[in-house]
Structures are given as C-alpha cells and as structure tokens.
Image (tube, grey):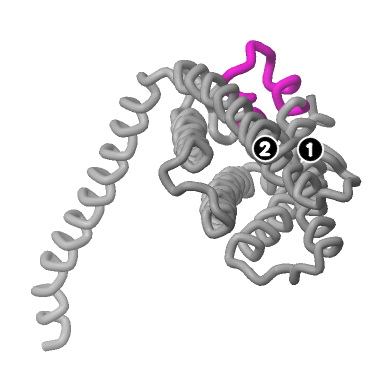
Amino acid sequence: MYGGEANKDFPKALNQGIRANEAKKSERETKTATMTRLSGVPALPFTYVAHVLEVVAAVLVLVWNIHFRGGLAWDSTNKSLIFNLHPVVMVIGFLILGSEAIMSYKGLPFNKEVNKKIHLTLHLIALVLGIWGISAAFKFHNESGIDNLYSLHSWVGLGTICLYGIQWIFGFVTYFYPGGSQALRREALPWHALFGMFVYILALAAAQLGFLEKLTFIESAGVLKYGAEAFLVNFTALVVILLGAAVVISAAIPGPSEDPHSYSSISDA
C-alpha cells in the first residue's frame, strides 16, 4: 500500500524537481545575459564624467569657503575660518580622493598590481584627510563653546569615517600584507566591494546632510535664501550627487574581460 502511494508520488516529485531546476537555470541565464549587456557598456566614459565633476566640486567648495566664508585657517581668532577647513577637506580630500581610489581599476592604464597599490594609497590618503577634516570641525566646536555630535550629520559622518578605516584595514590585511589565503580572498572579494560601496554612499549622504545643515545655519544668520551663496551651496551638493552616481556606475560596470575572482595578494604576484 505504502509502496504504491510512493510510486504514484514519484512522477509528481520528479516533475517538481525538473521545474525547479529549469527555473534556476533560467535565472542563471538571465543574470548572465544582464552581465553580458553591462559588459558591453564601457566604464571609462563614466570615469571621465566623474573627473570633470570632481574639478567642478573642488572649485565650487573653494569659492564658497574662500570667497563667501572668508578663507581657511587652522589657528585663528575668527573661529569660522577653522570650520571652513571641514567642508573643503572633506569634499576634496575625502570624497574626491575616495572616488579616484574606487575608479582606479577602471580609469588607469596600468596593470592590476599597480592599480591595486594606487587604490590602497589613495584610500589611505583619503582616510587621513577625512580624519583631519573631522578634527577641524571638533576644533571649531571646542574653541567656540559649541557642543559636539548633536546632529545627524555628525553621527553619520563619524560612523562613515570609522567604517572607512575598518574597510581599509581589512583590505590591507586580506589583499596586501600579510595576505589571506586564495579561498579567503575569493570569498571576501564581493563583500569587500559591496561594503566599500556602502561606505562610499554613506559618505555621500553625510556630505548632503552637511551641506543642508550649514546652509540652514547661515540662512538663519542672515544669508538670503535665494542669494548667490545659497544657490552655490545647493549647486555644489547637486554636483556631489552626480559625482557619486558616476563613480557608482563606473564601478558597477564589469570590464570586458574582468574576472571577479582574480583579486590576489601582492605577495603572490
């Protein structure tokens, strides 16, 4: 009796298994076709767009803080000049250099090992400058008698720089020195890339919160809401958004012969 019921159920279970396998195969083919289409889109033009936007963002943030805000200084009786270092260093030193580090694999004409070293070095410089930029904000607050870490911008910004440091240390230890096993590097690579992009997007979000916060403060202090400085700040924020979009797209597009599992330790080269 039980054997007969099992025999009746066997063809049904077999058909279900076949359909499940066909569905998985179809899903794999769809993903492969999508990657093939993406691989036909060159990443290099997006890096060119990002380079132009980086120059525009750097010029705008310098004009804002030097022309409209009065200049830059690490030590000054005018404490606002100390704070002005914060947006300048965070945009040029942290965001722009971080963007260049991300695009180094797609935008530089060197071999993979050279690009990896450039990638590591640029991220390290961006991290150091980011820490300096945040310290300028703390210095301004402390010398002006203003509380620290009371805003969402400060929370997201400090969290971003901490995650950035963790990401850099993990990448250095796993892919450079002493270098993890081949299996570890292969398994960690997609997570390393995904987490790095997450931290980069967090940095973009922190920048937008910073622009909004500073603009709110200066408008409450008398800056015209439809004046030249307000438009400049908003336009700078838009340029940073477009820059982030160009960088993310260039990083997401695979190269024509890119092997996603070929990221090896320098010591193995």
Q: Amino acid at mark 1?
A: Leu
Q: List the residue tagged with mark 2.
A: 65
* Span shown in magenta: 99-117
* SS for callout 1: loop
Q: Amino acid at mark 2?
A: Asn
Front residue (pair 52, 24): 52
Above or below, 42 relative to 27: above
Q: Main secondary structure of the magenta part?
A: helix
Q: Are marks 2 and 1 in contact (CB under 8 Å)?
A: yes
Q: Residues within 10 Å of mark 2 (few under 14, many from 20)?
A: many
Residue 219 in the image: state x and y as whole percent: 52, 54
Above or below residue 41? Residue 24 is below
Is residue 170 shown to the viewer in this render? no
The answer, for residue 221, to whether it is visible in the render is: yes
Please state the horizontal and vertical placement of residue 199, each as a whole percent of the image: 60, 50
In the visual, does 189 lie left or right of 14? right
At x 44%, y 29%, the residue is 253
For the N terminus, the quadrant is: bottom left
